[in-house]
């Protein structure tokens, strides 16, 4: 159920003489050895992508969509195999991995439809002149996807590039390579021309430093931390290369006094622990009206404490391990800092004993603004719940971070909703739900959470250039 780990370049699978071990975070066993791309492999991928671009950009949108849809169908048919691989390398519960496979397929299906809707337009002009706007593929895309969603994150990058007529070199996460490998296999089996999709792994800084300055690379698409995103943006700017950045978040949740407190608390606790909190849109900073704070906190803590933690392959498990060993001490430090500054650790607070990178579902109450976790995204199963006296105070607290990816609220008051739409500084605002995006909706952030959008009718914009054509009937 775990794939043979290889690079995919110019339509062929290849190995190298240097490897990176892939670890099961639940058992700490080695799942496989991942080839590390050499500079010569990257150059081969670049040459292949250039050849692939010429062929793929000249392929009709209808034919591109057919291949993308065939690949998505194969992914659906292979759901169980892919999900088993994801759970083994990432740790998330198997039901969540199965859903991720379907979500990845949905990204391809949506963008396949959008491939046939990259409309231009005619602009009214004087007699004898025609103004036309054309949308064309931007070129070779260098894409970088993170480890927290091994299937759906690579899918978003690949779907946008291929639907637009671009070729792509994807550097997927070394910790969780299986999802991207399964995607490449599906496209190979679906008949995608060689070189249109290339998949590499290795030292991230080496790969980005080598690929981004290359002339054929016209777009850098990245999902990951704000720090790395800034670095890649700076590198791309030196070569006037466009960027699409989906960066970190620190999502606020505003709980108003008129809501169903029990339902909101249970929903928040369950969603906070999904994917072990390793989600850029994970609800983390709960700002609860003081009149319902005690009830909300008690219900939230009780549900969080009941979270079933274990190996994601076992039935009934709700939360698996953290995806890598680096996250355990990082979370421990954030919790200890909050505790030292006066926060109450209502449940959890540390690593679980035994093998694997397991961390307790953790809830912190009454956390002061001086605690690091109020500014730093924990990216783990840690929630902060603080009381606020009013909606104005909640919005001010929500906006008091440099991030603005997703935000949430529980209320039934129209005036509260209107105020939050106007004032909460996020790219995605959800009311009475903790879902942040769907394939048909645009997704992206503001402030230090990046720029550009994936998904929705806006999802192909970054992968295309706009060309204006002025045709005069006579020479003027």
Image (tube, rainbow, N blue to C red):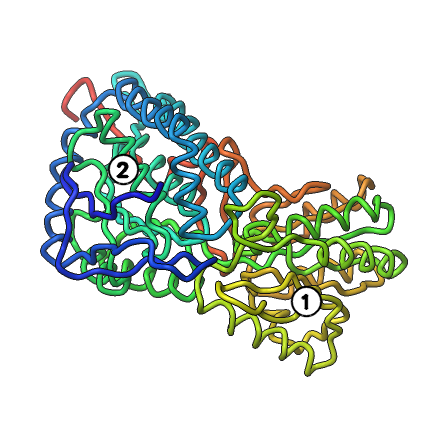
Q: Is residue 368 visible?
A: yes
Q: Residue pushed farthest bottom?
A: 340
Q: Is mark 2 on a helix, strand or loop?
A: helix
Q: Please name which of the two marks, 2 or 1, marks the residue nearer to the observer.
A: 1
Dot 1 surroundings within 10 Å: few (below 14), some, or many (20 or more)?
some
- Among the 4 quarters of the image, the one containing residue 157: top left
Left or right: 73, with 139 as reference point: right
In this view, the residue in front, 302 or 374, is: 302
Q: What element carries label 1?
A: loop
In this view, the residue in front, 473 or 156, is: 156
Where 353 sits versus 420, above or below? below
Q: Are marks 2 and 1 in contact (CB under 8 Å)?
A: no
Left or right: 41, with 425 as reference point: left
Residue at screen point 53% across, 67% down: 354
Residue at screen point 42% across, 32% down: 79
Left or right: 211, with 229 as reference point: left
**N-terminal-most mark, 2 or 1:** 2
In the rendered image, the quadrant that contains the N terminus is top left
Where 296 sits versus 70, above or below? below
Rendered image: mark on residue 447: none
Residue at screen point 25% across, 48% down: 5
- Among the 4 quarters of the image, the one containing residue 12: top left
In this view, the residue in front, 458 or 475, is: 458
Give how far across and how far down residue 180 sits, in percent: 32, 43
Residue at screen point 85% across, 63% down: 389
In this view, the residue in front, 327 or 399, is: 327
Dot 2 surroundings within 10 Å: few (below 14), some, or many (20 or more)?
many
Instruction: Find the distance from the CA under tag 2 to the CA under tag 1.
Output: 40 Å
Give how far across and how far down residue 278 sits, in percent: 52, 56
| Residue hosting label 2 | 184
| Residue hosting label 1 | 348
């Amino acid at each position: 159920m775990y794939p043979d780990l290889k690079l995919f370049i110019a339509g062929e699978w290849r190995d190298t003489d240097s490897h990176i071990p892939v670890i099961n975070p639940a058992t700490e066993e080695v799942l496989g050895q991942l080839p590390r791309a050499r500079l010569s492999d990257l150059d081969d991928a670049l040459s292949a992508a250039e050849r692939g671009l010429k062929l793929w950009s000249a392929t009709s949108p209808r034919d591109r969509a057919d291949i993308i849809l065939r690949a998505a169908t194969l992914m659906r048919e292979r759901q169980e195999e892919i999900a088993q691989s994801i759970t083994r390398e990432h740790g998330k519960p198997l039901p969540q991995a199965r859903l991720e496979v379907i979500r990845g397929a949905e990204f391809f299906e949506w963008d396949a439809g959008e491939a046939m809707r990259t409309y231009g337009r005619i602009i009214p002009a004087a007699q004898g002149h025609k103004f036309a706007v054309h949308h064309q593929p931007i070129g070779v895309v260098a894409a970088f996807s993170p480890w927290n969603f091994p299937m759906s994150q690579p899918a978003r990058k690949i779907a946008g590039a291929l639907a637009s007529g671009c070729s792509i070199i994807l550097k997927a996460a070394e910790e969780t390579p299986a999802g991207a490998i399964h995607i490449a296999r599906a496209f190979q089996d679906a008949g995608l021309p060689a070189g249109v999709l290339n998949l590499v792994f290795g030292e991230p800084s080496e790969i980005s430093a080598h690929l981004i300055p290359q002339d054929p690379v016209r777009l850098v698409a990245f999902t990951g931390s704000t720090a790395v995103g800034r670095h890649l943006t700076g590198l791309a700017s030196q070569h006037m290369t466009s960027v699409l950045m989906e960066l970190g978040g620190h999502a606020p949740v505003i709980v108003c006094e008129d809501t169903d407190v029990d339902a909101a608390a249970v929903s928040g606790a369950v969603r906070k622990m999904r994917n072990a909190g390793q989600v850029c849109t994970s609800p983390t900073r709960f700002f609860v009206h003081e009149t319902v704070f005690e009830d909300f906190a008690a219900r939230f803590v009780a549900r969080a404490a009941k979270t079933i933690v274990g190996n994601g392959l076992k039935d009934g498990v709700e939360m698996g391990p953290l995806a890598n060993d680096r996250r355990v001490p990082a979370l421990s430090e954030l919790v200890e800092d909050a505790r030292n500054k006066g926060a109450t650790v209502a449940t959890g607070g540390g690593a679980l004993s035994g093998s694997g990178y397991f961390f307790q579902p953790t809830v912190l109450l009454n956390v002061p603004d001086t605690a690091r976790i109020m500014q730093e995204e924990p990216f783990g199963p840690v929630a902060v719940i603080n009381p606020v006296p009013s909606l104005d105070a909640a919005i001010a607290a929500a906006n008091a971070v440099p991030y603005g990816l997703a935000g949430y609220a529980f209320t039934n008051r129209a005036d509260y909703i209107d105020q939050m739409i106007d004032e909460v500084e996020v790219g995605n605002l959800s009311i009475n739900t903790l879902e942040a995006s769907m394939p048909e909706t645009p997704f992206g952030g503001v402030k230090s959470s990046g720029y550009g959008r994936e998904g929705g009718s806006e999802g192909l914009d970054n992968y295309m250039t706009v060309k204006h054509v002025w045709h005069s009937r006579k020479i003027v």
